[in-house]
Amino acid sequence: MITIKSEREIGIMKEAGRITALAHKAVKEAIRPGVSTKELDKIAYDVITSHGAIPSFLNYHGYPASICASINEVVIHGIPSEDIILKDGDIISIDIGACYKGYHGDCAKTHLVGSVNEERRQLVKVTQQSLFEGLKYARPNNRLSDISHAIEKYVKSYGYSVVQSFTGHGIGNKMHEDPSIPNFGEPGRGPILKKGMTLAIEPMVNIGTHKVRVLEDDWTVITQDRKESAHYEHTIVITDDGYEILTKFEGEEFNV
Ligand code: MF3
Ligand code: CO
């Protein structure tokens, strides 16, 4: 069941989204060669908790950290570790969730570490833009898969693939709610979008095959061909005539 949020709930989700975005900003500022993903996790934890929120991911189905930090061929759910150190030329996808007064914000983006080659920079840029291509269809009376289709079409126009075995999702007082939001498919299918729906839309884009596998830690998802992957996610609310992003922060635009 897809829930419609009240103005009161949307107000709380805006605050959850703002805190999520603040954590992203702090992590982004710390990203450089030599830093460990564990250090980035601590930065996010501190920002989230100091604003009276709880990291949504921590202990979620046993997940042991506040962020996912997924480097190069890691698609999603990379577990932060003091042994994983960023290197010049890496791309790193950071995914953060914060729960404020019982409501969640969820947001991911891929960052460049030092000087990054053109192929990786283009992947990151296309992944980011694919979300916004999808969001062009985020308005009342459109169908959910209009968003999915626009994402896939844009990604494929660059010869990249979209991950199929993980999707975006509704979000609210649970991190994962209905509907599931694939990043591919025919347009004109699925539920009709309505004002007050809150959705986390999150394309995961691979340079090579769309196929992925999960490592023995039962979390880390990597590409089957070990080529790079990028991830971009925002939490949005459907408004009267479009959508509003709840997890945006000033200065988040990339220079890729
Ligand atoms: N942001 C992820 C999602 O949208 C959640 C991370 S999974 C966790 O599904 F287990 F690490 F929390
Ligand atoms: Co999500």
Image (cartoon, rainbow, N blue to C red):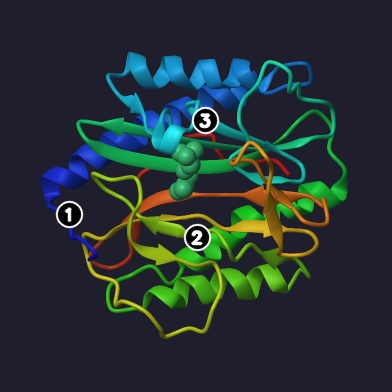
**Residue wearing tag 2:** 167
Classify 14 as above or below 119. above
Question: What's the residue at 76%, 24% (across, down)?
Answer: 86
Gap in angstroms between the C-alphas marked 2 and 3: 18 Å
The residue most toward the front is: 216
Discs 2, 3 touching: Cβ within 8 Å: no
Q: Residues within 10 Å of mark 1 (few under 14, many from 20)?
A: some
Tell whether 28 sits left or right of 21. Answer: right
First reached walking from the N terminus: tag 3 or tag 1: 1
**Residue wearing tag 1:** 5
Tell whether 108 sits left or right of 246. Answer: right
Gap in angstroms between the C-alphas marked 3 and 1: 26 Å
Q: Position of residue 69 (x, y in %)?
A: 62, 33
Q: Is residue 97 visible?
A: no
**Within 8 Å of ligand 1, the CB of disc 2?**
no
The residue most toward the right is: 117
- Helix or strand or loop: what does disc 1 sit on? loop
Q: Is residue 150 visible?
A: yes
**Residue wearing tag 3:** 67
Tell whether 90 sits left or right of 30. Answer: right
Amino acid type at circle 2 is Thr
Residue 141: which quarter of the image? bottom left
Classify 91 as above or below 28. below
